[in-house]
Amino acid sequence: MSKQIICNNLTLGYEDGVVTENLNFSVSTGDYLCILGENGSGKSTLIKALLGLKPQLSGEIKWCDGFSARDIGYLPQQTPVQRDFPASVREIVLSGCLSKKGFHPFYNSAEKKLADDKIKQLGIDSLARKCYRELSGGQQQRVLLARALCATSKMLLLDEPATALDPHAQLELYELIANLNRQRISIIMVSHDITASLKYATHILHISKKQLFFGTKSDYINSNTGRAFIEKGEI
């Protein structure tokens, strides 16, 4: 499998101090990487760095084979304001094309077809004309996934996508993400759900101010770090 991202000795933080340091990991085409860590461990700062929104203090983020931050579809944590956004499902999904539009103010026919295809792919075509804020939490996450897929066919970066969903909606969302991964879309998911992480991930990156572990899921399960946190049942 070809590498998409290689991070070497990555140190992240702000002018007043380091948040996390000495991160060494990579993501290859088709990987499903779960990033684990307690609150304040640097997960959000790492997300910003991968998206090109924040420079690293030191180290390197190497983009391989023409891949770049623009090829990442991002699904952020939802805020109450975002959940109440007054737009139609189709309008929300179409907005995923904006990162590729440059200065063109209108959507072209190819972009409209792409949005309609992603709406159908995620099984929300019956909701296309509905107002986004009238949907359930699980339906809203499907809409935002469709939006992210309009921005990329290579990699999705998901920041705790199942937070605040009921158990049934969580399972549906995790299975949907796993199906996208089976279609060779690489997944990077930040999560506190160790059960889901160990069920779906191919690789684990565990950080806590520094890197505690990076490797395959099976190696994580058998590592001292993995056993300690698996026994706790959550992160």
Image: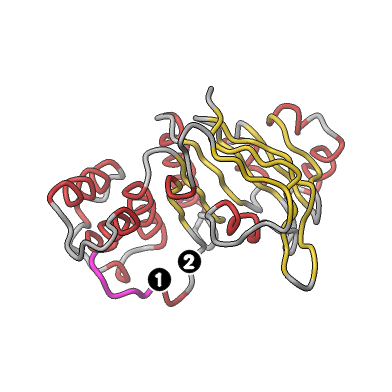
Q: Is residue 191 visible?
A: yes
Left or right: 16, with 108 as reference point: right
Q: For residue 191, which numbered disc appears in the image? A: none
> Closer to the camera, 137 or 62?
62
- Find numbered disc 2 in the image and state the secondary structure of the residue it sits on: loop
The x, y position of residue 205, in whole percent, is: 70, 42
Q: CA distance from mark 2 to mark 1?
A: 7 Å
Going by the numbered disc 2, the residue's amino acid type is: Gln
The x, y position of residue 69, in whole percent, is: 49, 49
Q: Identify residue for label 1.
A: 83
Inspect the magenta stretch and tell me whether residue 87 lies in it.
yes
The x, y position of residue 46, in whole percent, is: 64, 55
Q: Is 104 located above or below residue 126 in the figure?
A: below
- The reply to whether discs 2 and 1 touch (Cβ–Cβ < 8 Å) is yes
Assess disc 1: are there few (<14), some (14-19) or many (≥20) residues with their C-alpha within 10 Å of its C-alpha: some
Give the image quarter of residue 60.
Answer: top right
- Seen at 73% across and 40% down, the residue is 24
Assess disc 2: are there few (<14), some (14-19) or many (≥20) residues with their C-alpha within 10 Å of its C-alpha: some
- In magenta, the rendered stretch is 84-88
- Taking the view exactly as shown, the residue that stands out farthest to the right is 224
- Taking the view exactly as shown, the residue that stands out farthest to the left is 109
Inspect the magenta stretch and tell me whether residue 140 lies in it.
no
Going by the numbered disc 1, the residue's amino acid type is: Arg
Q: Is residue 235 visible?
A: no
The x, y position of residue 130, in whole percent, is: 21, 65
> Closer to the camera, 31 or 193?
31
Q: What is the magenta segment's predominant secondary structure? A: loop
- Seen at 51% across and 49% down, the residue is 157
Q: Identify residue for label 2.
A: 78
N-terminal-most mark, 2 or 1: 2
- Find numbered disc 1 in the image and state the secondary structure of the residue it sits on: helix
Left or right: 61, with 181 as reference point: right
